[in-house]
Image (tube, grey):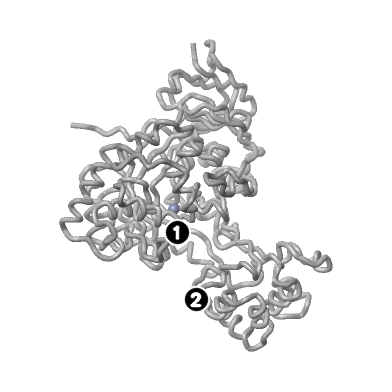
Amino acid sequence: MYDLVLKGGRIYDGSGMPSFNGDVAVAGGEIVEIGRVKGAARKKLNVDGLALAPGFIDPHTHLDAQLFWDPLGTSSCFHGVTSVVVGNCGLSLAPARLEDREAVIKSFVRVEAISRRVLEEGFEWKWTSTKEYLDVLGTRLGINVAALVGHIAVRHYVMGEDAVEREATPEEITQMQRLVRQGMESGAVGFSTNQNLRHMREDKKPVASRLASKEELGSLLDVLGEMNAGVVQLSGGGADARGRISYAAELARRTGRPVLWQSISHSWSRPNHWQEMLDNTERVFREEGLPIYAMTQAKPFQNRYTLLNAQCFDEFPTWKAAMFNTVEGRKKMFADPDVRKKLRAEAIEDRSPSVFPRRWDVIFVDHVKLSKNKPLEGKSVDEVAKAQGKDGLDCFLDLSLEEDLETRFVHTNTQGDPQAVCQILKHPAVMIGQSDAGAHMGYDARFGYCTAFLGCWVRDYGIMPLEEAVSRLTFRVASLFGLSDRGLIRPSFAADLAVFDPATINTLEPEYVQDLPANETRMIQRSTGVHHTVVNGEVVIEHGSPTGAYPGQILRPKRWKD
Ligand SMILES: [Zn+2]
């Protein structure tokens, strides 16, 4: 007798081969039969007209802590995600001794914008080693978890607070290597580091991994090379993308291990930069055969702000002075023609790369205060300015001033140009993900990268066949992380499945809920078109709702032992 049969779906098996109609039978947590299944089953799901795919594997999350109070990993599970990778960006909760916990929390709080109270009250810290962390985490999980060993924790474990002050000595590097090896031997899928120059702790000190010399990082990654196992996840590592790609290549050359670097995306201030990054990445793996991959995201990063709360101008000195002024002082500055000259020069005329798009045609009026301005909603600032016979900056500031700075604008920091995003997503060296699930819960939610990818880019833009798209979210990720029994619908593979309607699948706009420890608020994100999520043969989400099953496991790669 089977445990579960999914009857009458269209099977996208994860390999990229043509899809076909069939049933899938599950027993003992594994897929046991595919095709026309005849035997009886304890549970049957009629999936007629729906797509049946391996569960999606999210390669980039920060759910390390959240999974303790939310073992389902919401909202990832609402998008067909059955496995997640934690420990990204150099940040893991192990190894950590009692005296290192504060340093690790300080880093998480600032880099991933997770509230300190949530981290302090959300779980009981019952581990020191990576093995103990995985054992505790594995006691109650709704989805599967694969973990990276994070450089920041390793550094604090060996160096204490010196980790944020100086380079390591050769003896300290040897001790760190031992910790990396222990982590890998207890089932980690790789090592992550954070070289992002913007990443600081709560106390403004750089995160510990940023103080590592190249030799330190190389030596730690040599452990992966010696074991011939594991992925290197690289956050930052060079001021520009060219530097980052050559750094990723250097690490792959040294260790022979795959390097997943962060990230390729379109940005308005450097609209052709993504192409240069793709070309450079491609050159490295085509010419040298080095396994380096770039992360990208399927969801644009939307920035909604008023001139009461905007942070997107912080890199420009006059803007920053205005935004840190009192509201009255700020209004005076915005009204002053001489100040406006400086504001214009910094934000628009200066062409150096910035997070701010530096162009008014991609900044839109999102919400107005005065009813007479209602017709402006949805229009670009450029469009409104032209209609009013004004310069863009004057239009932007005049409108804000007229509405007591309450006019809300929206622009897309990254991935704003659909034509560029199509090219990036299609590229063979690109890994789709970067959901950052579990991070910056207060102002953004991108849990739904896979539903956005399948709905917006694959269905609506038609960038690739659904078969290939499913493979991108499943088999390819499993292959990279060495999860040898995941990512395909095959007999003997783990029964992780996502059942969805290709005609309606999509991500929904994030929404606020107050369900965090310490009663704090976060953004969640739901989807449309995802019907069921099956983890290790048990239905975790049925018709969109949690069933109360917790079949998740820690995924430890199988390694050959001679
Ligand atoms: Zn991250």
Q: Residues within 10 Å of mark 2 (few under 14, many from 20)?
A: few
Position in image of residue 360 (x %, y %): 65, 72
Do we see residue 557 in this rendering? yes
The residue shown at (26%, 49%) is 256
In this view, the residue in front, 456 or 194, is 194
Does residue 504 appear left or right of residue 141 in this picture? right
Q: Which residue is mark 1?
A: 110
Does residue 4 appear left or right of residue 146 in this picture? right
Residue 352, which numbered label? Answer: 2
Please identify the quarter of the rendering in which residue 394 is found.
bottom right
The type of residue carrying mark 1 is: Arg
- Give the label, 1 or 2, closer to the camera: 1
Position in image of residue 279 (x %, y %): 42, 60
The type of residue carrying mark 2 is: Ser
Position in image of residue 353 (x %, y %): 49, 72
Q: Is residue 215 above or below residue 135?
A: below
Q: Secondary structure at mark 1?
A: helix
Please identify the quarter of the rendering in which residue 139 is found.
top left
The residue shown at (27%, 56%) is 160
